[in-house]
Image: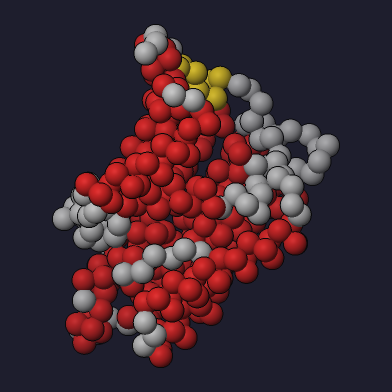
Amino acid sequence: MGSAEQISQLTIDGLMVGALYAVIALGYTLVYGVLQLINFAHSEVFMLGAFGGLFASRALVPDGGATPSGLASAGLVLFGLGVGALAGATAAYALERCAYRPLRRRGAPRLAYLISAIGASLFAFNLAGKEFGRQSVPVPELFTNGTVLTVFGAEISTQSLVIAASALMMLLAVDHLVAGTRLGQSIRAVAQDAECAGLMGVDVQKIIVATFVLGGLLAGAGGFLYAMTFNASYTMGFVPGIKAFTAAVLGGIGNVRGAVIGGLLLGLVESFGGYLFDASYKNVIAFAVLVAVLLVRPSGLLGTRLGRPA
């Protein structure tokens, strides 16, 4: 296969991208756990969050401006993450309010939710293309000091380290929230039996909104992290969104820790698969994994119970 350094580099690259997939996948798995529905507009929430973080960073570091360094760069990343998360949460709330809640009140069939989500996705996609332009837009360069860490011969840049650390902290925070807080208990109760949870005093409507907003926060922040490496574009949501959905299915759609494991595994499969075959096959590999999981183990590696392995 190659030298130990090359294997180490592929592993680290795969884990970094996989962590981003896991952050996006959590939005799919949370909404599915509560509503038993796939939010196909989640990819556009991710895209809108990326543009929110992009515009925030460009406002502080305009074109031709001085490149920040040290704590200034870290502060800009936090600011971009915060604005991206806010943009994603706002988009997710609007999605729940306009595309899902009216159908839920009318007791609409599941197919209506799917059509509504696809319609909302297309609306956001085309609106972003019109308002933000049809060309990809780079996030201002925040880190220029190159390699700062070497692990078993693999070189890690400051930007990669920041992206991976940010994604890891978000994953740990969500796992703690779902597994160990009162809100998390309410989310798991609604996921298990919404009617019974309502009878026990849980405000089901507020929990549904909170779940959408939480997923939007993650998607928006993940969108900004993704755009730091791959730029922002109105088309950027589709492929990462499908891959994140693949990660959620791989780990067990509806299972928080399963989404994390699925994202990391998918990142590794893509990284090594692109090396063994060709980089242009990365998307093919991801979708092949989705089909294989659905055929062999439809419930995923850890099952579909929200918050902890089944």
User: Left of 116 or right of it: where is 76?
Assistant: right
- Residue found at the very far right of the displayed protein: 64
Q: Does 307 appear above or below 147?
A: below
Extreme residue toward the top, this view: 3
From the viewer's perspective, tell me whether residue 305 is left or right of residue 208. left
Q: Position of residue 66 (x, y in %)?
A: 78, 34
- At x 63% / y 52%, what residue is drawn? 235
| Residue 79 in view, yes or no | no
Rendered-image quadrant of the C terminus: bottom left
Residue drawn at 33 percent across, 72 percent down: 35
Q: Quadrant of residue 104?
A: bottom left
Q: Give the camera-side residue of 217 and 244.
A: 244
Say which of 53 and 118 sits in front: 118
Please indicate, yes or no, whether residue 2 appears anywhere in the rendered image.
yes
What residue is at 21 percent from the left and 71 percent from the top? 192
Look at the image and tell me in which quarter the N terminus lies.
Answer: top left
In the image, residue 107 sits, relative to residue 272, either above or below, namely below
Give coordinates of residue 25: x percent, y percent: 40, 52
How many badges with numbers are in the image?
A: 0
The quarter of the picture where residue 255 lies is bottom left
Taking the spot 32% from the left edge, 52% from the top edge, the residue there is 249
Extreme left residue here?
Answer: 310
The reply, left or right, for residue 260 in relation to residue 47 is: left
Res 292 → quadrant: top left
Residue 149 drawn at (x, y percent): 48, 19
Q: Locate residue 199, reporting x and y percent.
A: 21, 87
The colour style of the image is secondary structure
Q: Nearer the viewer, residue 263 or 116?
A: 116
